[in-house]
Amino acid sequence: MLFSAALALSMFACSVARPQFEERRSYGNRSPKLYARAEVQGISAHFEFVGTTDGEPTFVKLQVLKGLTNDPTLGGPFAYHIHTNPIPPDGDCTKALAHHDPLNVTEGLICDPAFPQYCQTGDLSGKHGKLNGTTDGKIATFGYSDAYVRFFPETHSLLGRSIVIHSSNKTRLACGNITSFLDGTADVSFRPTCRRSKYVKDYPTTAPIQPSPPVIPFNGTVMTDPAIIATFPYPLPVPALSLAEALNVKLVDITHSVKFANVEQSITQPSEKKVDGRGPFSGWWDTVW
């Protein structure tokens, strides 16, 4: 059983942009899939997220159709993330606020693909690599699996949020809302409804202050020596549970003793607790997946 969210990068959201849709007709038990496309400041990109209710990783597929060139003035390679808040109708990418980060990893700890459980949930390029510009500005469709990107619960959900593409100096080049029929931000044909998410309703009003300078907690595929971790200026987050470890989770606070900045300290951190249940979404059956 599958469910997905489609994303069109749209500068002016539904009020101005008119995404074009490609309908793939249903054959037999195959469900129709629709793809939304829109240009943003000369960049046209498409993302898709597909999840299951059996603990398999979320599949992320993306394509850049235009505008992401290797011109040095554009500032590649390009990071991209899931951000906490949706983009308003005026297309202001700053309103997306910060990266989706339910476990408060922060940008103070640099993501290492070998240890994704310690990365921000929304740091897709940190876990899977930045986008490199090309001569013609196009990047062919590719995809990957992410065991930590979730459709539920609400605290962790990608629904009702946004994607932001950044230049290497963190300038926000393009942004767009993640829309899905699951939360009412798209209809069953994946056309955006221009409505707020019916599932994710609790959004931050300000972006958190990020610790500085950032540190690299891991180097390679071997866990860093605890004695070295204890010297970091910031504590490691509580590691995230993968979808295979816990299909559904609850966000709780734990207070424990942690050594960082060479001092043993009692701190409270968010943590995930495994809970029963297959989530609120039934999805749809599609033989092609």
Image (cartoon, helix red, strand yellow):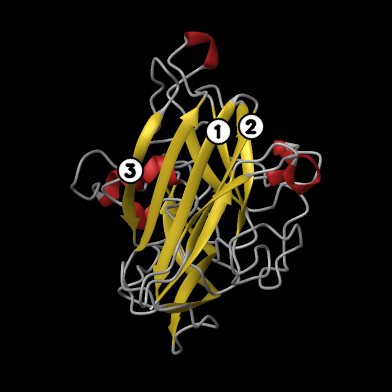
Other residues around mark 3 within 10 Å, as few (<14) / some (14–19) / many (≥20): few
Question: Which sits in the foreground, 138 or 98?
Answer: 138
Q: Where is the N terminus found, in terms of image quarters?
A: bottom left
Mark positioned earlier in the residue sequence (1 or 3): 1
All told, the count of numbered labels is 3
Question: Which sits in the foreground, 148 or 1?
Answer: 1
Instruction: Determine the residue positioned at 51% across, 68% down.
Output: 151
The residue beneath circle 3 is 142
Whether residue 99 can be seen here: no
The residue beneath circle 1 is 44
Other residues around mark 1 within 10 Å, as few (<14) / some (14–19) / many (≥20): many
Q: Is residue 240 left or right of residue 16?
A: left
The residue beneath circle 2 is 40
Identity of the amino acid at label 3? Answer: Phe
In the structure shown, which secondary structural element does the residue marked by tag 3 occupy? strand
Q: Is residue 233 above or below residue 257?
A: above
Instruction: Determine the residue positioned at 53% across, 80% down.
Output: 281
Q: CA distance from mark 1 to mark 3?
A: 15 Å
Question: Which sits in the foreground, 145 or 107?
Answer: 145
Q: Are marks 2 and 1 in contact (CB under 8 Å)?
A: yes
Measuring from the top left, give residue 157's x and y in whole percent.
55, 66
